[in-house]
Image: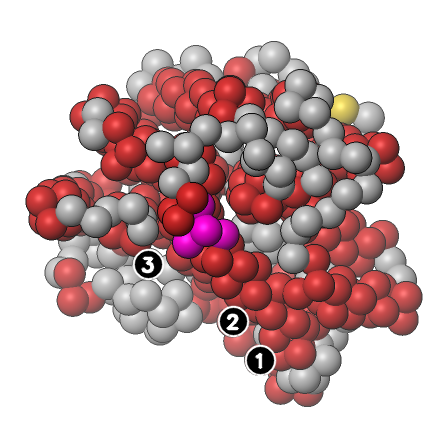
Amino acid sequence: MSVSPKSIYGFFFFLLLTLYMPFLPGMHLLPWDIAGFNVTGWAWLIMLAVTLGYFLVHPKVKFPIAYWVPWILYMFVFLLMDPSFLGLQLTLQYLLPVFIGAVASGLEYDDRSVEWFYRGLLIFSAVLLIIVISDHTVHIINNHQWAASAMVITIPAAILISKFFVTNSIKYLLFYGLLFLVPFLNITRMGILAFVVILFVYPGNGKILYKAMILVLGVLMLLMVFNSKSFQEKTFFEGQGELNEVSFNYYDDNSKFNTNGRSSFYQYFEKGLSESPIFGNGPRADYYVMNSFSELKEVHNDYLSIRYDYGYLGLSLLFIGIIGTMVKVYERYRYFKRQKMIVGIMLSSVVLTLFIPLLMFMYSDNILKYTIFFPDIYFTLIGLVFADNSKSEMI
């Protein structure tokens, strides 16, 4: 039996609560650490417990979990062969978003409940915008989640773009423009690019006039960012550079392009990658490499991290899960369009749009480990694409 539309609000509430939690210490509303764990750690543990609770009560799954079973089994086999606390934590972090998507797919929603969730995400994005502006002006609030802010803000941005194309209301496009300040002020370069990519890849953009407008808007946004003093100073060691000097290869040994240290530490992983390219070196082996030469705990590249820990086989199994799920989402998108189900169209459009930013952030950071900042919400939307939407209205 599926969960009623009323019960789904509880699930949405905890998703939004755990989304706020990592920013509360910077707002002086929570201590940075509670009982030895930081607030971010508590947030994803709370979501793990909530998701498990929902699954035990309503174990109905419509999510295409079959594509993920090989990856999940592979991780658990590795954990049994090489047990450790860090390995267990990593396994649960990778598993949680998929688990959330599976649980969300067993829920029953109506148009009002999804709109409530959208509204909650948009309110959060407005709060996050205030936090970022304050951090760069009056310094009353300390936003220490710069990279995470750029990741999570892409979700409400994609929702705003979907609302713009559905309603033709310019207010959603203006709100999207305001949210662009989050990655722009923090100069999170992949976040800036992902934000603009959303404009280009949104599948609901079918009008020629809108395509032209989006193209012009996207180019203007990128040129404005590139020519800004703060972007130039962060991107080039000399404080100034040309467009052709920007490299998308973070491991390119370019004397002018600032990769924030990535080009220098890749050498420490070469030995392990070459010695065990197929099966990897074990869960969280990348942490011990980073710890041997740096205070950083993460590689800031999911592809490199998974290759080092789980090998090419593990990375391939992960992509079977991701790509297989996106194929099924696209099938649902076409179904929603045939049935003219507006909420389903918006949900599947947002999911398909955010697929590209997901792949981008996997290259520039460890987005799969930062479950609450993007994957939890994203996989919730994926799950809703497959959930019972019989009460949804048609257009």
Q: Which residue is labeled 1 in the image?
A: 270
Distance, label 3 to label 1, CA atoms, is: 21 Å
Check disc 3 and give the amino acid type: Asn
Residue depicted at 51% across the width and 30% down the height: 392
Residue depicted at 41% across the width and 70% down the height: 251
Which quadrant of the structure image shows residue 303? bottom right
Q: Which residue is labeled 3 in the image?
A: 258
* Contact between labelled residues 2 and 1, with CB atoms less than 8 Å apart: yes
**Quick one: quadrant of the C terminus?**
top left
Which quadrant of the structure image shows residue 87? bottom right
The boundaries of the magenta stretch are 332-336
Distance, label 2 to label 3, CA atoms, is: 15 Å
Secondary-structure class at tag 3: loop
Distance, label 1 to label 2, CA atoms, is: 7 Å
Q: Is residue 184 left or right of residue 373?
A: left
Secondary-structure class at tag 1: helix
- Badge number at residue 266: 2
Q: How many labels does the image show?
A: 3
Q: Is residue 296 above or below residue 132?
A: below
Check disc 2 and give the amino acid type: Tyr
Residue 63 in view: yes
Instruction: Indicate the position of residue 24 as horizontal and vertical percent values.
Output: 58, 19
Find out whether residue 335 is within the magenta segment.
Answer: yes
Check disc 1 and give the amino acid type: Glu
**Quick one: quadrant of the N terminus?**
top right
Q: Which colour scheme is used?
A: secondary structure
